[in-house]
Image (cartoon, rainbow, N blue to C red):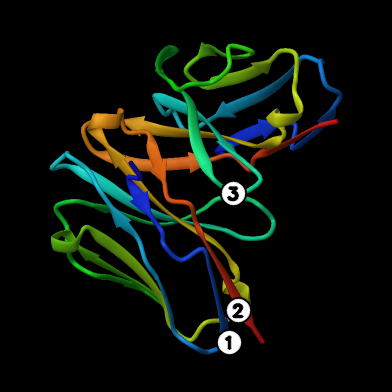
Amino acid sequence: DTAVSQTPKYLVTQMGNDKSIKCEQNLGHDTMYWYKQDSKKFLKIMFSYNNKELIINETVPNRFSPKSPDKAHLNLHINSLELGDSAVYFCASSQRTGVNYGYTFGSGTRLTVV
Amino acid sequence: AQKVTQAQTEISVVEKEDVTLDCVYETRDTTYYLFWYKQPPSGELVFLIRRNSFDEQNEISGRYSWNFQKSTSSFNFTITASQVVDSAVYFCALSEAYSNYQLIWGAGTKLIIKP
């Protein structure tokens, strides 16, 4: 039973298209995240939702829009894709209490914009 | 300012050698958490360890060991008797209340174990 699942695993698309990446967790965690890993392997937070509420929104182009229909799902929609959006996107979840229990990651979505 | 520094971009050793990966962090919180993750060539992020700021005991798990030193703000990772399967990129990360508990990542150290 996959704890954090992302779909699709690979996504190849043309510039200018709109695409979505879905993420679901079955751990009962309160908080979900999107991280971007660039070609140099650098990982950076993009968004964080706690119980469907946006709590972190880093400097990300507004072409990226997260959507959290419930606390088990955090989807990432990207409009007007650009070459520079090519990266691996990781979804993660955590139980946000006073004690930080750690994070569970999805297997990543490799987005290639051509 | 870099909050998590992994100064070693790439390390290459021969199998069975011991290797230490360095991690230095900075935070203004007194309660924080430090992590190590492994990213093998297949791409997934594999959790290795979580350490909270109040627990300075060193940890050993098989061939892996971690040395947490608050005095030097370091959380170094040692692999003893390295194996080819240890080849991966290793990330150190910090989680602090000041940053809403997001993971703040180091740049990663690529470890190559040659047979």
Mark 3 highlights which residue?
A41
Q: Quadrant of residue B87?
A: bottom right
Does any portion of residue A97 appear in the rendered image?
A: no
* Distance CA(mark 2)–CA(mark 1): 6 Å
* Distance CA(mark 3)–CA(mark 1): 24 Å
Seen in the picture, residue A41 relative to A25 is either above or below; the reply is below
Residue at the image position 23 percent from the left and 38 percent from the top? A99
* Distance CA(mark 2)–CA(mark 3): 19 Å
- Expressed as whole percent of the image width and height from the top left, the position of residue A60 reads 53, 20
Residue B15: mark: 1
Residue at the image position 68 percent from the left and 17 percent from the top? A78
Judge the density around disc 3: few (<14), some (14-19), many (≥20) Cα neighbours within 10 Å. some
Q: Quadrant of residue B15?
A: bottom right
Q: Amino acid at mark 2?
A: Ile
Q: Amino acid at mark 3?
A: Lys
Mark 2 highlights which residue?
B113
Seen in the picture, residue A98 relative to B22 is either above or below; the reply is above
Seen in the picture, residue B13 relative to A10 is either above or below; the reply is below
Residue at the image position 14 percent from the left and 52 percent from the top? B54
Residue at the image position 37 percent from the left and 54 percent from the top? B5
